[in-house]
Structures are given as C-alpha cells and as structure tokens.
Amino acid sequence: MLTGSLLLLASAVAPSCAVELKVSRDVLQRTLKQQLFSGPNGRYYLKGTAQTPCFVYADDAQLNFVQDRVVVVIKAHAKLGKTFRNSCLGISLDSAPQVSLAPIGEGETIGFRDARLDKVVDQKELNFFITPFLSHQLPSSMKINAADLLRKSLTGATAATGFKVTLDKLNVHSMHTQGDDLVVDVDGDISVR
C-alpha cells in the first residue's frame, strides 16, 4: 500500500507525460443521447413538437466505430403536410440516415469534425431537414470534456487512499479507434496532497 502511494506521489511530481485514455463506445453513445436526444421519448425534434400534428424528429441514435471514424445511424420520422383540425394532411416518411465523424482533440475536450453523410435519405422532403442536422447539429453536440470525466473519477481517491488526488491540467493530442474504444492520447498534471 505504501509503495503504491509513493509511486503515485512520484508520478504526480514528474512533468506532464503522455498517457492513453480509453473511452468506450457506450460512453459516447450515452453522451450523445444525454446531450441531444433528451427530449420526450428520446427524440430530437427538427420541426414541430410532440404536440404538433406535423413534425420531423430523429431518435434511436446508434454509434459504432469504422476505421478511425465514429459512425452514427439515426432513425428519422416525419409527418409532412398541412395541419387541419389537429391532424396532419400529407405524407409519413421514415428512414435511417448515417453520418461519420472524425474525432479531434480540442484542449481538454474530445470533439468531432469532418461530418460525412454516408447514407442519405431517399426522400428529398425529409433530406431537407436531416442533412443540416447530421452535418452540423450532431457533431457540435457530441463534445466530451475528458478532464471533467477524470476529475469526477478522482473524487473518490481521497476516501480510498487518504490522499487528495486532483487533475490540474489535461491536453488532448490525438485519437484513434481500437475495437469498441476511442483511444485518446493525452498529457496532463496530477497533484497528490
């Protein structure tokens, strides 16, 4: 126990060095759902609301890794037309578009850029709403502050070790996918008091 504590102390005094932080696919998917699909029934409304007869919404986001890209498939549902007596006179459309994103480091944050529409919607009426959502809204909503994740993880270290362990600085450098994990290369400073 004492040897482990001394090793932890010695590593905390050393200057910043690179380490790998693994973020699972499930963490990214939960983050996406919390930040974007937090509406009624896990839906994100692009037009209308749960109470309007005509609407367009996305739900059931599924996330996977393909090569070094994050692939997100959503289900898109729409009732497009004119509202008449609390009904939507028009057409109903359903589709499953797909976008892939490149992960990037932005200081303490894991972000995403270079949104590519890998599978677009065949119906141009629905595509009008879905394309901007997949290209802009989805990537900007999928940010994860890696430093905050680590700080929350370290809060229990005091009770377990008797030492106060804090993350003073974190910088994300690069990322790649490996199996079901996003492997993030970071450096930072940890203090033990």
Image: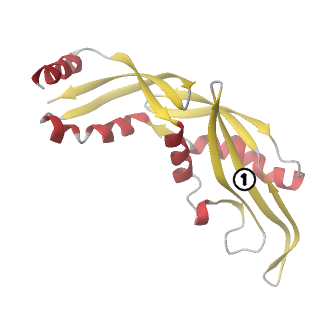
Residue 85 image offset from top left, x and y in percent? 82, 85
- Mark 1: which amino acid? Lys
- Residue in view at x 68 percent, y 75 percent: 51
> Where, quadrant-wise, is the N terminus in this rendering?
top left
- Residue in view at x 78 percent, y 82 percent: 86
* 135 sits left or right of 192 in the view: right
* 151 sits left or right of 173 in the view: left
Residue ID for mark 1: 75
* 128 sits left or right of 72 in the view: right
Q: What kind of colouring is applied to the model shown?
A: secondary structure
Instruction: Tell me the quarter of the picture where residue 113 sits.
Output: top right
* 179 sits left or right of 118 in the view: left
Q: Residues within 10 Å of mark 1 (few under 14, many from 20)?
A: some
> Where, quadrant-wise, is the C terminus in this rendering?
top left
Residue toward you, 157 or 17? 157
- Residue in view at x 56 percent, y 27 percent: 179
Residue 26 image offset from top left, x and y in percent? 52, 42
Residue 191 image offset from top left, x and y in percent? 21, 27
Q: Secondary structure at mark 1?
A: strand
Q: Residue furthest bottom?
A: 85
Numbered-mark total:
1
- Residue in view at x 18 percent, y 17 percent: 10
Image position of 151 with respect to 14: above or below: below
Residue 31 image offset from top left, x and y in percent? 51, 46
